[in-house]
Amino acid sequence: MKSLLIHVSKDSLSTALQAALKAISANSSSRVLSGILIQAQTQGLILTASNIRMTIEYKLPVKMDSMVVHNTGEIVVPARYFYEIIRKLDPGLIRLEIVESLILNIQSGSTQFRLCGMDVAEFPRIQYIDHPNIQRISMKNTLLKQIFKRVVFAVSSSETRPVLTGVLLQIEKQNIRVVATDGIRFAQHVVESVEDYGAIPLDVVIPGSTLEDLLKILNDDADSSTDLEIGPKQIRFISNGLRVQSALLEGTYPSVNNLIPKAYLSEVIVKKDRLLHVVERISILASESVMLSVLPSNMLSLVSKTAEIGDVKEEIPLEHLEGDHFRVAFNGKYFRDILRAIDSETLRIRFAGKERPLVILPVDASSSTLFLITPVRTHD
Amino acid sequence: MKSLLIHVSKDSLSTALQAALKAISANSSSRVLSGILIQAQTQGLILTASNIRMTIEYKLPVKMDSMVVHNTGEIVVPARYFYEIIRKLDPGLIRLEIVESLILNIQSGSTQFRLCGMDVAEFPRIQYIDHPNIQRISMKNTLLKQIFKRVVFAVSSSETRPVLTGVLLQIEKQNIRVVATDGIRFAQHVVESVEDYGAIPLDVVIPGSTLEDLLKILNDDADSSTDLEIGPKQIRFISNGLRVQSALLEGTYPSVNNLIPKAYLSEVIVKKDRLLHVVERISILASESVMLSVLPSNMLSLVSKTAEIGDVKEEIPLEHLEGDHFRVAFNGKYFRDILRAIDSETLRIRFAGKERPLVILPVDASSSTLFLITPVRTHD
């Protein structure tokens, strides 16, 4: 065992730790997975954290004044303790050194922590297998975050159909399509990239939890981009010293095209913020369903009732109505999630019949986003 | 049943609700105690919330434009729902009306909530019995908050000796003394008021939880003051439309004067902020005890060890040392709580022997605050 010895600034180490710790779930089953792998190599410091599904690796390159490697080496230490210790140290350089065989010495000014380490051999590493079928594409971070942010909320939170806990990503030439659904709500975003990704179509399902973490870690710089490496069972996101590797979800993603109503009976246009406020208020009573009605007075009415607690009703003006008045009930929380994912000022709601999904479209020329919500059956 | 009808501004109602809701614990046992009593009287609106130990009443007087009573009346509604509804309404006037016998209609703009009410008769009220032995004193809010803030953290969190979950308040003439202890740590604050409260001595134990809520609700205006009405079993705090009534704790508060060491072997002076940072870092390892040693090098050393996790040591310079070097172990979290309650720049630590409590004193001429912490026995 080589005895790691480095100096690293508190700020750099904290940033790296915050990113890597996204992989560590609060109640990790195996003790070694609650750890973080610290590797000092000649090129820099690598921190790796992992859970069953995802591994995050963050590399701090050698840099005069903020990252100096005196001796290479590696150790696994309890991640939460290590993070809490680093966070509470005074600003400035921190000295990390392996003393004895499994003790990490952490020194800053007159503070000295000695943290018991764990066996490095048990820790999972990111495997860089060069599979012949690996597809590689590169995407601007802004685009990558935009496409997944629009749909990831709609994945299923239940493991009964695991493939629905993921987001379907399809790329062919310049066309990118992402889809998420839990069977009741559905979100789809289609965008044409400035880049051509080639003729071989890409069609994978990425776990929603991986994407949610990725959205938090990836930076928003207009210049930053991420390389995606997609193998038969895994996907890697590589950006600025960060490597996130995740299992892909297996199984066939359900065909969703026939869910989208082709024709509709009515369409209304409403202000998005106004509607969102109303739906947030209505959700307070936590009822199973919200009844939405288009009234002859050219108003949109929302009503919700909860036995023994009370009821609420509210009306907002329509900007536009085409077709007949209608009336449909659906899950208020799901509707609220959809409205929160929309950033356009107004939106269209299309009604195709009492048993067909309601279609919600941002009124926004630049992209093509579509949401569906399946109605709840009511007895009136 | 009279049918309440009022108009009240969202801001006034929210402020009143936030104060009153401090009395409602998250999991109230009886359904009516999870409610809030709304009373419209000719003089204004009164909101009352209660738990077993404490009742909070907040009065909004009639005020043109922000509080108008059209019809008096009263109802009890679920407090959390009522608060969430008011919070999410648009700014402006809210119309509250009792419709049918137990329904509260809440209207704002085009929003209409109807909330199911509960039976008013079951709800506890603040009883204004004019007992001959009631003592009345008035205190500036700034003074009231200062004295309790210094000591309330030290009350016991265990119900084994209920009297220790409270703060002892003793007043005689101009002298105010507050004491809190859980048997291991001890906090005392003595202050001379500008006012003379008279010769009849006051000696009561107020629940720590009541005082913690009171510290959050009372405003900090230099002009505001609070009237205290102290009966044989209850205390009331009355300030600016707010009335807080709490049971007093029964039982004899332990005599604590003989706990305080009269003589000491050593005294050190250290910077408070520096020591607090060190103790906060050391507490990360969550060890049972911290070993504090005064070293011949004129340094204060703190060491903590936790089996299987690791250890930490740190040294800080002494500003002053009188007497011998010493070495003593105590609970790190308790020590941290004491340091957080101190706002002076430096503090004194007095050592009176390995089995005697450590004395901690802010170096601050204006008041007399004293903390004790009982050592943990160690085997070295």
Image (cartoon, coloured by chain):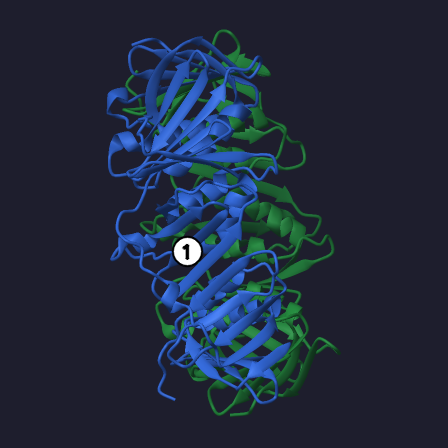
Chain colours: A green, B blue
Query: Can the viewer see residue A359?
Result: no
Residue at the image position 53 percent from the left and 86 percent from the top: B324
Point out residue B355 in the picture as x, y percentages from the top left corner.
37, 79
Point out residue A10 in the picture as x, y percentages from the top left corner.
64, 71
The quadrant holding residue B201 is top left
Residue at the image position 38 percent from the left and 27 percent from the top: B48
Query: Can the viewer see residue A216?
Result: yes
Point out residue B16 in the picture as x, y percentages from the top left corner.
48, 28
Residue at the image position 39 percent from the left and 71 percent from the top: B374
Q: Secondary structure at mark 1?
A: strand
Closest to the observer, B112 or B1: B1
As drawn, A319 above or below A333 = above
The quadrant holding residue A46 is bottom right
Residue type at mark 1? Val
As drawn, A26 above or below B325 = above
Point out residue A173 in the picture as x, y percentages from the top left corner.
63, 51
Residue at the image position 48 percent from the left and 44 percent from the top: B215
Q: How many marks?
A: 1
Q: Which residue is mark 1?
A: B179
Q: Residues within 10 Å of mark 1 (few under 14, many from 20)?
A: many
Closest to the observer, B51 or B366: B366
Which of the chains bears the disc numbered 1?
B
In the rendered structure, the answer to whether residue B27 lies left or right of residue A90 reads left
Closest to the observer, B60 or B322: B322
As drawn, B93 above or below B361 = above
